């Protein structure tokens, strides 16, 4: 829980008023000591109260196998503490130093095509290397022992962005660990042979030693081998996280431990919902990738991070004050973006707003990545905006610790289906699991209907409507859970390519979608994927792309909500709904996109009685979320547009923004308002 | 000859009436025994009379170096025999089992960039590995010995799709074998140095051991080295085919042997015309790749397979009932496609129509590849269409064994020119040998003029007109043969980049096209390739792309059929014809595409007196082929469109379709009719 | 100096009249002796007086480690000498023979991803291999000793196109040599750690042995490591050049030494301005890549070659008579292109016009590369054009030895900025250093204002206006030099992303462009790169793409020449000028392209009083250059269009072309005129 972190911060300054955290990665080793004093002065000026230190300091802390240099870090920790800044101290294991990779090149990762990933950048280590593990844990133990009692220490930051570059390693170390993992999963080779379907293409294993990662092969490697390698690779990194955490817990049982996730864009190698149980609070890094849905994506990722954190407050460990350095073109943020982006994370449950990084580097691969203190220095509009945001976060302190209030709609986001649905040798290579979920999310935003991203670890029953886009992997127990959900009055909506395979990626036979066929009251004999550029029309204004299905209605009460009006399946059902005990089960067989879904959704939400949170004139212009504290709910209203927006009929006490006496809120472009509404 | 196979089938059931074969790859090892009985029941229902078994069964048959498990296969063979289904038994060597690659990683292929192709998929073996060869032949011997006398056995199926993924191997085994092959081809290093032109770029070899495959190099590798490596690689696989065949012939001299070719799309690594002499009957795999010329391509490939089989009946070993799994988007077949595609192969000489595969897999990399029994099971439109096709093939039994009747036009398809014309460091990298040939073929289809794809092994003199598109490699003997052909009244048509090099890829000097300059009566000083998007106009409505030539007419009787009207060579000849002793030699210097060729062709065909087989109203709408039996010719008429087509003026006895009393045939969309016309 | 070469030629024939050189690479080893006599006959006919011999003859000259075969070369040298043709004799080290790479595979280069570059093509050697070096130098010594006194020998041609394929080698040899180079550059690891900013990402080195080339890494490798590896790689090849040269100088001190540069297109690995001091005269290879700016690029490259040669005459070692063989589509030259392209090089200072190659090869990877004698032979329009050009060059003999007359404008072309500005992890990956410079050059061509490409080794003060596009790397001394330049009345124009970093790629802090901030009188807090397709409008008709800057004017006298009228920085300055002591400093913050620059330039040139050399009606249609001999200036006028152009008001004595009595010159399409104007 992030509250442990906050209570440690209280411990450091005695001030027990609630607060939001504000800060950055801080890399003093890149600067002469003369700059450090200035840093603390500017941090105070900006309202910074927490920084992450030491993330890439291994080579500085341990310059040789048996040499340690903690002096500079002691000094930094003391300085920060004196300045009233808590430290989220990194274990510094993210990037092995040159002496280690020179002595032990066998820790370097290997690609599927056999290429070594050499030093020169960062994160060049095999998650399964026993040599790397040994050296990393030794460093963790030294660090933890040294700073266990330091008053600045408020949390531990394990490694950094685990798996950002090294999640898939095909080395011999990985092969050995993969076998161990498989042995633990399957017990016997017979079970593995069955699960992997090795009767196909003469792949039957007779010794564990024969098994390899899915390295470059002559054709499509075994799909279950591929899927299990994804599972294994996520688990191998989780195992590293646990190994570091165990040492930290042993030495500093009271200091909360986190590691920064990367819930954003296409990052899918790490099964974060599964990892969340391993850390004391969830933290996340998020960067905007410019494009037409860019701020929808930010909201989606923040929302999903909240889902991974089970609705509890979380820590935004990194985002950017302006441009980044790793995209093809790194555009600057416009005025207002900095605060709006930060507050949108807070709206979705972030209690900490941190940036990469405090002071923009003068050298190195990230020198063109923006920071809180830019190359231009403190005399800059950027630093002034940073200071202003610090003040805003201070004003929002009352909502610290508040949780997410359940939305009427849940959108199920499932890593297993993400992994499996996008594998090769499928009906189409154009399927994009995350894009489909994002389009549904954008449609809810357009309607002003609140929707929570939820994971399979969440409680589905909190939502009247549960949308499960491309829920491809449906083991028997999930099928049962979904049936129970609808029997108990829940309204399930699912889409094309859902319910197709079990946990071993074996097709449920007898007609698609095997696992959900009876629940949906339909049967599909064949998929009808569409080539790029091809589309079909449906009843109403919608057009479908990517996919169609040859649907036969099998249950007498299944209703056809829309038919195909063109294409091979012209005249056949495209969208169906089967009523259940109080609930319903709806199937959408094609990709409608945000626009099509926005027009379809009202009809799908009607039986559940779900309506927009916003007056008609504000829908699509304003995003709204709700956090709930012990005494009050905090309603966020975020202007999604570049124009001024007026929202009438609101109540509450404005923590941010000004609510007119008649309950009308006027939001400047990109502005955010927060209303405190007392609980009855 | 496929007749040997048929006579073996007669041997198994005593019924000597002619028949067409119908079936699939059958992989019972993927299913529990309980399904096998059901399989045989459904095969009978569908009219299936032959299946290929054991293609990927190595790991099941030989689970360890010295362990054999034939029990399950015995059972399957018996069951099939009882069910009246003959077995085309695979030698099971297509995919080595994990125990073999673990013990002998040195059998794994290596790419030109040095990457190993690891197990996990299939066909991960070096064609030249002595270790693989030894193990594979041991398996073949065991299998042949065990099933030599089995009554279900009707043919041997060597390996599977030889070279699909492993034709180009750059390993040290390949290097050794390449040297042996070169030694056999050239005898001396002097001869090799001359042939490869190694005076260029300091490449002169002084020891055989210095020679390597054309691995990744700093720039364009030696072109003749590249060409010889293609020849060698095809021969290395042919050598494997022969090695397996020798054992089969030794043990079961009466059982015909085949291996399934892949005459389709861009598959060009294997010189199938050269391989055809090694097997007892030609079999082929064909898959449609959706696109504007997709069914022209199917016809072209079937036609070419017939050419490779020298007009004799052949065996369609694999095609699909609907979608495949390996294309970027795998579209389903529309109603009618399944039968039409199958019968188009029959129209071009297939006496067997088989699919990959019998029952759609629940797991593995091909689980989304359609089959005769789909995931939805027998209660499906797809299985009903499969059953209907079985009945149709039964009705067409009388044409079994009939051969291709020579068409007035031959299109020469030459693997040497295919390989050489598309090599690097050429005037253009956009040249597509097969596309040019396909466009000519499409033009003949549009005109309703029958054209046979023929290879250099065929008898060119059977055709009044011989089209040789991009006949790039013209050794002296071929130049003489073509001159003889035209001297004897034949009409030769050839195109840009023809007659340029000899068998060593050395340019014929003195002006292009050196080898055919005198025959054509023209001389070209320079090529004028066009960049993508560039085009030139010609007299008449045609436009040319890709290529132009700077042509000078050198023979007094050479006629200019069309000039360039734009571009650098404006006013110069674009299409020329030189009359010869009763025949002629025509040159087309640019890429006209199907549309341009369709407008040009009537003029080219006129001197040969070649005319359309179809009434004007059916041209372009209907494809027509003729097979000839001892007593009758069988004329196929295939509706190429999605509309109903009427063809007047026909005669014969309709084996398929209905011929009205007035000789008018009405063909539903995609329908096929077959008329039996007695021979005088 | 090329004059040494000429005086040697005089030595061989006693004729001391000035002359231009004309010839080609000559590869007699590819042809039977019977052709050699014919070659010399045709050379005489064409006016050829120099050829380069032996470039790829290593395998022919040294067929085994201890076997030498100079007989054929003796014969060729004698034949050429008898024919009056001088020989630029290659050291033959460009491509190691098979026996060497077989015995020593450790000389083969290795890519950043670990792939070996195998033999089969050419230039498969590591620049840093001691084994290769030893063998290469042994060959050089043998050759030099043998031909030291041969009368045909007029110059030495070291290797060939050094670095064309092997400039970046990541082998262990390269690693060792890189460390030596770094030790020499930095002296201590502390200095290197500072320069590379290794405090970032835990990259601190504690032993020299830890340092590696920037091989494939998990993310962006250290930028200064990348930049230093580029510097090192250029130096490694330069070191090879020097090693060969030392032997040649030792044995034949009077024979001038060159190596052919590749100043063209994107070739940027070799820092030619830095290499120029190592050779006795500059020679260059240039090939046209078809496209809208293709002849601007030719002019640009020839101009830059002249700059690298410090304005002294240079040697065009290779270009093509027509098509090449290595582009995706190799288009033929149109009539007139051959002479015009050649003479454009002469206009920019070439005293020798040579082609690759003399006789078009019948075999090998370059057989479709055009030559002086094409496949069609001497009876061809191409050979006739070659002969005509020989006559033209004879007529232009008087200008031999004349130098470049300084233009009013210099364009600074800086290899350090080229390398650094295009590195990864930058604000945009779309920045193209050379294209920006070329666009400025095209704008000057459009205006008829002469501009010299100059390097940092040149004397900047010769030009009234100095344009420095994307002068990204500005060490302190360069900043001072530029300030001095403007203080002394020079007009500096620079652009976006200039003045950003020092020689270690460290950002100058405090606001961009740090190194030039005060000089320009502006301050930039943030970059505003634009995504592809995005553009902004400026005052006037111009639009900007790629980049914008958030500019604040800081000096009271800085004038804003244009503002942004759209985009994030709307209303802010886009183009500024600050007056200095008699000069000025102008900043252009966006990419205007040729069209935008053409409209902006007159305003920028005005304060410097720079005006067009051409009458208004000829601007943009004619390119004009001036070479200056001891007694006369030679003015070139090149028709850049495909139409006839008339230029009034000219004076001089026409060496080429006809000047009417009224001073009007009429230029046919693509024609070139040369006027001799006596010096006062």
Image: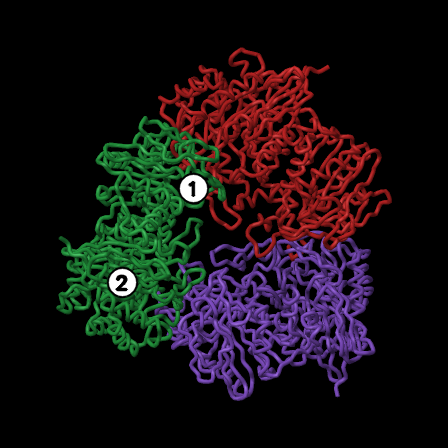
Chain colours: A red, B purple, C green
Q: Residue at x 15, y 68 (%)?
A: C12
Identify residue for label 2. Answer: C353
Q: Under tag 2, what secondary structure?
A: strand
Identify residue for label 1. Answer: C541
- Measured as percent of width and height from the top left, residue C20 is found at 21, 63
Residues tagged by mark 2 and mark 1 found on one chain of the structure: yes
Query: Is the residue C286 above or below the residue B209 in the image?
Result: above
Query: Is the residue B230 above or below the residue C418 in the image?
Result: below
Query: Is the residue C109 above or below the residue A578 in the image?
Result: below
Q: Nearer the viewer, residue C597 or A649?
A: C597
Q: Residue at x 26, y 34 (%)?
A: C483
- Measured as percent of width and height from the top left, residue C3 is found at 17, 59
Horizontal placement of B648 versus B284: left or right? right
Q: Residue at x 79, y 58 (%)?
A: B381
Q: Nearer the viewer, residue B506 or B619?
A: B619
Distance, label 2 to label 1, CA atoms, is 42 Å
Horizontal placement of A151 versus B598: left or right? left
- Measured as percent of width and height from the top left, residue B254 is found at 69, 77
Quadrant housing residue B508 = bottom left
């Amino acid at each position: 829980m992030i509250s442990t972190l906050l209570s440690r911060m209280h411990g450091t300054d005695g001030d027990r008023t609630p607060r939001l955290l504000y800060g950055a990665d801080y890399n003093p080793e890149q600067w002469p000591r003369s700059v450090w004093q200035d840093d603390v002065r500017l941090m105070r000026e900006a309202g910074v109260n927490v920084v992450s230190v030491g993330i890439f300091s291994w080579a500085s802390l341990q310059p040789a196998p048996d040499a340690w240099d903690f002096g500079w870090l002691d000094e930094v920790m003391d300085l920060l503490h004196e300045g009233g800044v808590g430290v989220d101290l990194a274990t510094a294991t993210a990037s092995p130093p040159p002496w280690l990779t020179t002595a032990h090149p066998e820790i370097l990762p290997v690609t599927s095509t056999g290429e070594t990933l050499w030093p020169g950048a960062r994160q060049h280590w095999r998650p399964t290397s026993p040599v790397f593990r040994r050296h990393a844990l030794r460093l963790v133990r030294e660090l933890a022992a040294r700073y266990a009692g330091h008053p600045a220490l408020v949390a531990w930051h394990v490694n950094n962005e685990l798996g950002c570059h090294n999640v898939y390693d095909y080395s011999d170390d990985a092969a050995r660990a993969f076998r161990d993992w498989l042995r633990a999963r399957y017990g016997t080779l017979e079970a593995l042979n069955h699960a992997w379907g090795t009767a196909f293409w003469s792949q039957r294993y007779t010794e564990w030693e024969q098994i390899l990662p899915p390295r470059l092969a002559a054709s499509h490697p075994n799909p279950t081998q591929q899927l299990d390698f994804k599972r294994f690779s996520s688990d191998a990194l989780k195992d590293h996280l646990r190994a570091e955490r165990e040492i930290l817990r042993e030495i500093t049982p009271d200091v909360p431990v986190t590691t920064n996730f990367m819930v954003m864009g296409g990052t899918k190698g790490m099964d974060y919902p599964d990892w969340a149980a391993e850390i004391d609070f969830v933290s996340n890094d998020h960067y905007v990738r410019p494009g037409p849905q860019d701020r929808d994506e930010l909201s989606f990722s923040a929302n999903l991070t909240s889902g991974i954190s089970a609705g509890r407050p979380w820590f935004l460990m990194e985002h950017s004050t302006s441009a980044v350095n790793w995209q093809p073109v790194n555009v600057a943020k416009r005025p207002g973006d900095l605060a709006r982006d930060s507050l949108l994370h807070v709206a979705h449950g972030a209690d900490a707003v941190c940036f990469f990084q405090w002071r923009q580097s003068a050298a190195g691969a990230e020198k063109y990545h923006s920071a809180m203190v830019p190359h231009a220095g403190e005399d800059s509009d950027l630093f002034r905006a940073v200071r202003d945001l610090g003040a805003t976060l201070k004003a929002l302190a009352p909502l610290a610790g508040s949780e997410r209030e359940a939305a009427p709609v849940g959108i199920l986001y499932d890593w297993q289906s993400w992994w499996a649905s996008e594998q090769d040798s499928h009906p189409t290579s154009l399927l994009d699991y995350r894009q489909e979920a994002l389009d549904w999310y954008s449609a809810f935003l357009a309607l002003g209907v609140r929707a929570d991203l939820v994971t399979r670890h969440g409680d589905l029953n909190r939502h009247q409507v549960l949308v499960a886009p491309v829920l491809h992997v449906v083991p028997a127990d999930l099928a049962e859970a979904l049936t129970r959900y609808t029997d108990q009055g829940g309204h399930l909506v699912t889409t094309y390519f859902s319910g197709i395979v079990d946990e071993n990626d074996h097709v449920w036979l007898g007609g698609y979608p095997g696992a959900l066929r009876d629940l949906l009251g339909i049967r599909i004999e064949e998929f009808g994927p569409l080539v790029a550029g091809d589309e079909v029309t449906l009843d109403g204004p919608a057009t479908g792309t990517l996919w169609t299905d040859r649907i036969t209605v099998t249950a007498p009460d299944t209703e056809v909500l829309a038919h195909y009006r063109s294409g091979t399946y012209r005249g056949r059902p495209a969208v169906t709904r089967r009523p259940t005990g109080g609930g319903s089960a709806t199937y959408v067989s094609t990709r409608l996109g945000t626009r099509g879904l926005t027009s379809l959704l009202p009809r799908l939400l009607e039986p559940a009685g779900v309506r927009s949170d916003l007056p008609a004139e504000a829908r699509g212009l304003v995003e709204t979320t709700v956090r709930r504290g012990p005494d009050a709910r905090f309603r966020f209203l975020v202007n999604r547009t570049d124009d001024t927006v007026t929202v009438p009929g609101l109540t509450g006490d404005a923590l941010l923004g000004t609510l007119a006496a008649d309950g009308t809120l006027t939001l400047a472009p990109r502005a955010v308002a927060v209303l405190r509404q007392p609980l009855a």
